[in-house]
Image (cartoon, rainbow, N blue to C red):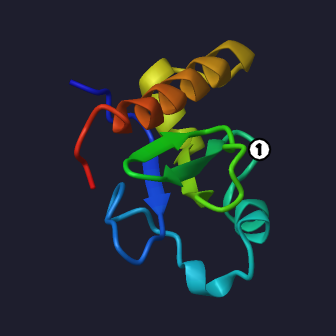
Amino acid sequence: MTDSFGTIATWHKRYKIGDDDHGIDETKYRSFEEMAEAEFRENDVWRPIYMYDHSCLTFSTISFPCPWDSWQLGFIFARENEIKKRFGKINKTTLLKAEALLIERVEALNESNEY
């Protein structure tokens, strides 16, 4: 079973991927860059989520080289309070551990049918 640490916030017309209650109103922003700057604070950990859609769906926190069949789908993130709850404190080590868990959760989407 995949660890459900973090929140997956994505926007796609055909697929429902991630968490319904992510709390981000995408209509307030013109771009993912603007959204990230406004939504995430210093001790939040976040990564973009990219999707490659070509005969199957593939997800990553690193962009794909194909500009036609891949794009940024959204974000995965953990707020400071969630990191403190999980690890007890905020420091460089716990922020790196939190980031690793977020990346693992996105990679697990490739093995699941969560969409």
Q: Is residue 24 left or right of residue 114?
A: right
Give whichever of 54, 14 is nearer the camera: 54
Whether residue 84 can be seen here: no
How dense is the environment of label 1, judged by Cα within 10 Å: few (below 14), some, or many (20 and up)?
few
Instruction: Identify residue type, mark 1.
Output: Glu
Q: Image quarter for residue 91?
A: top right
Q: Is residue 34 left or right of residue 29?
A: right
Disc 1 secondary structure class = loop
Q: Is residue 3 above or below residue 65?
A: above
The residue under the point 70% across, 39% down is 43
Give whichever of 72, 10 is nearer the camera: 72
Residue position for label 1: 42
Marker count (numbered):
1
Q: Is residue 32 above or below residue 101?
A: below
The residue under the point 37% across, 48% down is 56
Give whichever of 58, 89 is nearer the camera: 58
Q: Residue 54 at x, y = what percent?
A: 46, 53
Give whichever of 36, 74 is nearer the camera: 74
User: Residue extending furthest bottom?
Assistant: 27
The residue under the point 31% across, 65% down is 16
Whether residue 58 can be seen here: yes
Q: Residue 2 at x, y = what percent?
A: 28, 27
Quadrant containing the N terminus in the rendered view: top left
User: Residue extending furthest front?
Assistant: 55
Q: Residue 109 at x, y = what percent?
A: 36, 39
Quadrant containing the C terminus in the rendered view: bottom left
The residue under the point 22% across, 45% down is 113
Q: Image quarter for residue 70?
A: bottom right
